[in-house]
Amino acid sequence: DAGVTQSPTHLIKTRGQHVTLRCSPISGHKSVSWYQQVLGQGPQFIFQYYEKEERGRGNFPDRFSARQFPNYSSELNVNALLLGDSALYLCASTIQGARTQETQYFGPGTRLLVL
Amino acid sequence: KQEVTQIPAALSVPEGENLVLNCSFTDSAIYNLQWFRQDPGKGLTSLLLIQSSQREQTSGRLNASLDKSSGRSTLYIAASQPGDSATYLCAVRNDYKLSFGAGTTVTVRA
């Protein structure tokens, strides 16, 4: 079975532009979470979606938004890009949403560079 | 707010030596604790998951312990190999999210 997949693998944008990152969860998983990992730091939680509804949001500005589709895939959108948005964006999936003891499975990430 | 700390930040050992990686967290109301491995520029690979009711978990050369009351976990890697060189991250789950430490970068010298 395929694991969590993310696209694109790498992306270069300039300040002020908009970007869309995509994630497909493991088959049968209904929950997707997004994390931002800046170089040298641990990942920071951005969003969790379960059954197409937002279940949790981290401390990120409104420039960050996401959605989940009926097939449980997800998009992360970032508007008005800043240099500080340069990071590895990770997607994780689980079968259920919150209050679960499941393992979270992570994708390979999308490396975003903002110039 | 959950704070996760990993000590040391970096570790260099000769091949064959045992590794001990430490993780501490401030809020003991966790669902589980997960140890991950991350190779440079790559995603996260789950190594071990310890449920909040468990004290330890083992997989091959890896053993992780959890003391929830004191907010501590330790990852032991026996008989280290050069292929174990990577960054190791611990993460605790509260409700819907994982909170991560900054990681311990391990170098195993051949």
Image (cartoon, coloured by chain):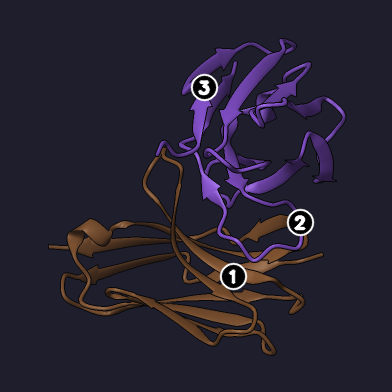
Chain colours: A purple, B brown
Among the 4 quarters of the image, the one containing residue A114: top right
Q: Secondary structure at mark 1?
A: strand
What residue do we see at 66% from left, 17% from top?
A20
Co-location on one chain, circles 3 and 2: yes
| Left or right for B18, reference A67 | left
Q: Secondary structure at mark 2?
A: loop
What residue do we see at 57% from left, 38% from top?
A90
List the residue tagged with mark 2: A98
- Disc 2 to disc 1, C-alpha distance: 15 Å
Q: Quadrant of the C terminus of chain A?
A: top right
What residue do we see at 40% from left, 39% from top?
A1
The chain letter under disc 1 is B
Point out residue B43 in the picture as x, y percentages from the top left corner: 46, 42
Q: Which mark is residue B33?
A: 1
- Disc 1 to disc 3, C-alpha distance: 28 Å
Report the front residue among B48 and A96.
A96
Q: Which mark is residue A7?
A: 3
Residue sitting farthest toward the front:
A28
The answer to whether marks 3 and 2 mark residues whose Cβ atoms lie closer than 8 Å is: no
